[in-house]
Amino acid sequence: MIDARGFACPLPVLMVQREVGNTQPETVSVMVDNRAAVQNITRFAKSRGYSVKVSDEGEDFLLELRKE
């Protein structure tokens, strides 16, 4: 689980990029607290072959990335 709450873009995307680049996991969970991060991570993940499911967790968002 990547906790990117409290970080402004592009840092949340870079955190996901580091995880995906290092281990190429089948799934990645990411918590963010702003819509810009949701949009940017979604765009990045799709460019790397991941599907993205976004859940609204109150003030936060949970992104579930799954390798297609």
Image (cartoon, helix red, strand yellow):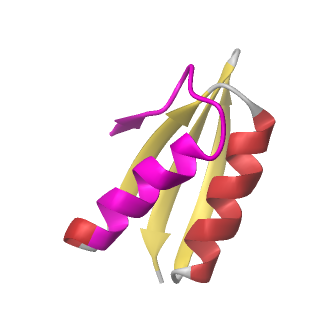
Q: Position of residue 40 (x, y in %)?
A: 71, 55
- Quadrant location of residue 11? top right
Task: Note whether residue 25 is visible.
Answer: no
Task: Note whether residue 6 is visible.
Answer: yes
10 is within the stretch colored magenta: yes
Q: Position of residue 56 (x, y in %)?
A: 70, 31
Q: Position of residue 59 (x, y in %)?
A: 70, 15
Q: Nearer the viewer, residue 26 or 32?
A: 32
- Quadrant location of residue 67? bottom left
Q: Is residue 52 above or below residue 55?
A: below
Count of number-bearing discs: 0
Q: Which quadrant would the N terminus be assigned to in this image? A: top left
Q: Is residue 3 left or right of residue 60?
A: left
Residue at left offset 55%, top offset 52%: 13
Residue at left offset 62%, top offset 47%: 10
Magenta-drawn segment: 1-21
Q: Is residue 4 above or below residue 67?
A: above
Q: Is residue 8 above or below residue 17?
A: above
Residue at left offset 47%, top offset 42%: 30
Q: Residue furthest left?
A: 23
19 is within the stretch colored magenta: yes
Q: Is residue 61 left or right of residue 68?
A: right
Q: Position of residue 57 (x, y in %)?
A: 63, 23
